[in-house]
């Protein structure tokens, strides 16, 4: 396709992004100031130009095709680049300013990032910080995220990666609970205990352990399950059972003697273990606000996290 035709497709590609994001021609058309039928014809024209079906239409909803998903992902990259062009021409890069959207799992956001927010905003008064608690997979392009923190051993290969530290899952209980119910010495003992788990999915009560070449899978149960770390920690402190946490969530409670770890000679695995990864899209011209946040995290948060992890390793 020659350059002239390609330039002509750019507005249609941008409209395609909006249709997918809104999930309907009607909602997207309202934002664009056109009729739904006109927008539908535009997408049909785009499909013809690309020789591929982008969207499956029905009377109630739209479904993006597999080929359409790949094109959509590339269109998001295009829009991100266009946004960078606008920023380059409209801001003073010597002064970090503008909106910055940061996403992280709820437990990490509440336990680790929260204390960093006010000092950062105080140091950079022209930055507007938007924090989003997102558990599970984070798509920085689809969700319009500038920086994502992930707890994973499989970071996104398409994003820049800065690994802040390692993180582990730990089991904890109150001394009162252990005095009443006994201290488990093997993962299979947990079947006889009340356990506090996430309850996000039907598999969250399945805990997987390994030690050297030995593995065990245990189906736990209990009276209280919640996918909010602080609420789960409060339940453990009150003696409701043995809870599962990331080490950074319970570090202070362990240091204060509010709770104690159990089964420390076993390692727990899950979808949220491995490393604390900070990731963001590759860009040649990084906005000053993005650079300011990255540098601030590396200077203030990474040393703190590594100190916490080291304390766990020394036990």
Image (cartoon, rainbow, N blue to C red):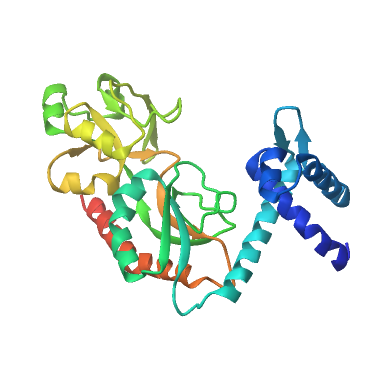
Residue at the image point whose x is 80% and y is 41% from the top: 40
> Picture quarter containing residue 198?
top left
Percent of width and height locating residue 157: 57, 56
> Picture quarter containing residue 36?
top right
Q: Which image quarter is the N terminus in?
A: bottom right
Asked whether residue 266 appears in the rendered view, the answer is: no
100 or 177, nearer to the observer:
100
Percent of width and height locating residue 151: 42, 48
> Picture quarter containing residue 220?
top left
Residue at the image point whose x is 83% and y is 49% from the top: 46
Percent of width and height locating residue 74: 69, 55
266 up-or-down from 117: above or below: above
Taking 263 as reference, is 5 left or right? Answer: right
111 up-or-down from 224: above or below: below
256 or 30, nearer to the observer:
30
Residue at the image point whose x is 65% and y is 65% from the top: 82
306 or 116, nearer to the observer:
116
Percent of width and height locating residue 194: 25, 23
Taking 111 as reference, is 179 left or right? Answer: left
Asked whether residue 121 appears in the rendered view, the answer is: yes
């Amino acid at each position: 396709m020659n350059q002239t035709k390609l330039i002509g497709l750019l507005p249609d590609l941008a409209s395609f992004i909006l249709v997918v994001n809104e999930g309907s021609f009607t909602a997207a058309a309202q934002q664009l100031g056109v009729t739904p039928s006109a927008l539908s014809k535009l997408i049909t024209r785009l499909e013809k130009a690309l020789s591929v079906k982008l969207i499956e239409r029905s009377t109630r909803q739209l479904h993006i095709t597999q080929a359409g998903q790949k094109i959509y992902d590339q269109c998001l990259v295009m829009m991100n680049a266009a946004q960078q062009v606008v920023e380059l021409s409209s801001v003073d890069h010597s002064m970090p300013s503008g909106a910055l959207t940061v996403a992280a799992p709820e437990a990490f956001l509440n336990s680790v990032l929260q204390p960093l927010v006010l000092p950062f905003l105080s140091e950079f008064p022209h930055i507007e910080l938007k924090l989003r608690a997102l558990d599970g997979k984070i798509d920085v392009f689809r969700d319009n995220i500038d920086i994502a923190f992930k707890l994973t051993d499989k970071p996104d290969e398409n994003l820049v990666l800065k690994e802040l530290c390692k993180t582990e899952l730990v089991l904890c209980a109150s001394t009162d609970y252990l005095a009443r119910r006994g201290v488990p010495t093997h993962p299979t003992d947990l079947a006889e205990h009340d356990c506090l788990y996430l309850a996000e999915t039907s598999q969250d009560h399945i805990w997987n352990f390994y030690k050297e070449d030995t593995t065990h899978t245990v189906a736990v149960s209990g009276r209280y399950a919640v996918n909010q770390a602080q609420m789960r920690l409060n339940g453990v402190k009150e003696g409701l059972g043995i809870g599962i946490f990331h080490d950074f969530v319970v570090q202070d409670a362990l240091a204060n003697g509010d709770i104690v770890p159990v089964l420390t000679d076993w390692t727990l695995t899950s979808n949220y273990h491995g490393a604390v990864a900070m990731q963001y899209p590759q860009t040649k011209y990084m906005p000053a606000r993005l650079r300011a946040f990255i540098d601030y995290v590396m200077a203030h948060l990474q040393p703190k996290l590594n100190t916490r992890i080291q304390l766990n390793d020394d036990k």
